[in-house]
Image (tube, rainbow, N blue to C red):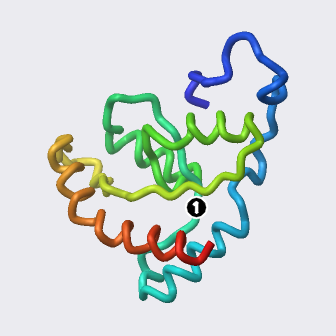
């Protein structure tokens, strides 16, 4: 829906079909593994599956944009992951994606919160050790 697609342009059939289907592209076994490992590490409250909406960056969404996307059923909004996933699907790769939520935008209509990149990086740095533990556990279980 963003309008920017990494597959735009000539297609080389050696890499994948002109119009790859995106339904069910995240590997069910790897998703289950993530939940099992998260459970083993006591991270059940940190792991959620949902609908990720890709926005074109580099900008942070407004509270109004967040509210409308959440109203439409989106669980997370971000500028990454989707483009890489589309290319991986085109190449028929096994796909697992995980997003660290670093911006819990205030959805109050009267909010004057102005998010900075420094704040997002600070949250990412705080949460990185937890994500690293999960990924290390997953790799050892493969």
What residue sits 20% from the left and 44% below the top?
Answer: 115
91 sits left or right of 118 in the view: right
Quarter of the image with the N terminus is: top right
Q: Residue 57: x and y, percent?
A: 39, 29
* 89 relative position to 83: left or right: right
Q: Could you say which is closer to the camera, residue 133 or residue 57?
A: 133
Residue drawn at x 37%, y 67% as measured from the top left = 132
Residue 29 rendering spot, x and y as whole percentages: 71, 69
Residue occupying the point 53% across, 44% down: 53
Q: Above or below — where is 36 with respect to 106? A: below
* Whole-percent x, y for residue 2 in the image: 56, 28
Q: Residue at x 82, y 23 (%)?
A: 18
Q: Dot 1 corresponds to which residue?
A: 50
| Few, some or many residues within 10 Å of mark 1 (<14, 14–19, 20+) | few
The quarter of the image holding the C terminus is bottom right
- Find residue 58 and report its horizontal and vertical position in percent: 34, 29
| Residue extending farthest top | 10
Secondary structure beneath label 1: loop
Viewer-closest of 119 and 30? 30
């Amino acid at each position: 829906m963003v309008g920017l697609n990494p597959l735009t342009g000539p297609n080389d059939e050696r890499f994948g079909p002109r119009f790859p289907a995106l339904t069910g592209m995240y590997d069910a076994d790897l998703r289950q593994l993530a939940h099992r490992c998260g459970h083993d590490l006591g991270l059940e409250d940190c792991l959620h599956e949902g609908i990720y909406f890709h926005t074109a960056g580099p900008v942070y969404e407004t509270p109004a944009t967040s509210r409308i996307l959440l109203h439409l059923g989106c669980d997370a909004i971000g500028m990454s992951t989707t483009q890489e996933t589309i290319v991986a699907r085109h190449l028929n790769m096994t796909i697992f994606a995980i997003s660290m939520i670093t911006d819990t935008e205030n959805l109050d209509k009267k909010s004057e919160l102005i998010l900075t990149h420094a704040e997002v990086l600070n949250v990412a740095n705080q949460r990185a050790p937890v994500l690293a533990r999960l990924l290390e556990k997953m790799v050892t279980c493969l």
